[in-house]
Amino acid sequence: MMTRRDALKLGAAGAAVLGATTVMPFVARAQEGGDTYETETGEITIHPIDHASFVMTVPGMVIYADPVGGAAAYEGHPEPDLILITHEHGDHYDAETLAALAGEDTRLITNPAVHDMLPEELKAKATAMANGETMTVGDIEIEAIPAYNTTEDRLQYHPQGRDNGYVLTIDGRRVYIAGDTEDIPEMRALEDIYIAFVPMNLPYTMDIEQAASAVAEFAPTYVYPYHYRGQDPEAFAARVAEADVDTEVVQGPWYD
């Protein structure tokens, strides 16, 4: 009998039928209530917002990742308990949006460069994390992971040591938010990642081949291609399927 992995290997040009289910090289979840994943005692729910911004509800906490674009984009979502900012570029950091979204008890975690830029009212809510540092917020352990370019003509965009990705340990599950980066050794060395968010747009991050190669190496259970304007997520999914790893590529409505 054809397995799901066998079906995925057929690639973007050939959906396969597995039993009564048509299997594509990526899974277009885009559920109205978000994409839900089980944890040890509850659920993680992912709500893609746009490009590199999303809302994640987890047991006991609501987390916003790189919220930009104004508060209206987040209507209908609960106020954030925690906001994560990876770096200073305008598609990841916008002080006006942060000020509109942050409540009295909202905490912000940023890289040091963004922390220095924050207006005073937001800085009072914020903690700077440098690459390699860890901290705990509520029951969630957070590790700041490097995010940087390695290709010569891209080094200007994200220099090594400045920007963050994050690994969050949430109720027994590890979630990786890559931010803007290429397929760096620190990404490839990750272990036991349940959900990953991986960028792939040029010239700022990496191409499809780099992204698929890295994902095949650290093999998350689920991976969301995001921050991919100008790249083909179906082609990425086909490359991941060809690598013969147990990773499901999830296509969110980032550009709807």
Image: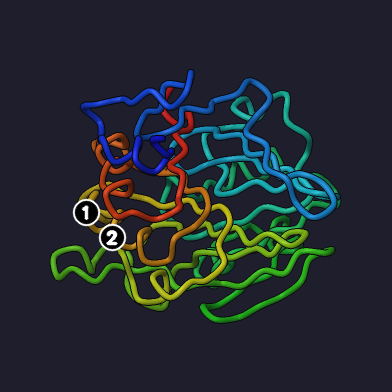
Label 2 sits on a secondary structure element that is helix
Look at the image and name its color scheme: rainbow
At 41% from the left and 69% from the top, the residue drawn is 187
Which sits in the foreground, 94 or 217?
A: 217
Q: Nearer the viewer, residue 175 or 3?
A: 3
Mark 2 to mark 1 CA distance (whole Å): 6 Å
Q: In this view, does 59 lie above or below 190?
A: above
Any mark on residue 209, and which?
1
Residue carrying label 2: 213
Quarter that holds the N terminus: top left
Residue depicted at x 55% and y 48%: 66
Q: Quadrant of residue 234?
A: top left
- Say left or right for 20 vs 227: right
User: What amino acid is at disc 2?
Assistant: Ser
Please name the amino acid that badge 1 sits on. Glu
Q: Along the horizontal axis of the image, is 121 left or right of 154?
A: right
Q: Is residue 141 above or below residue 106?
A: below
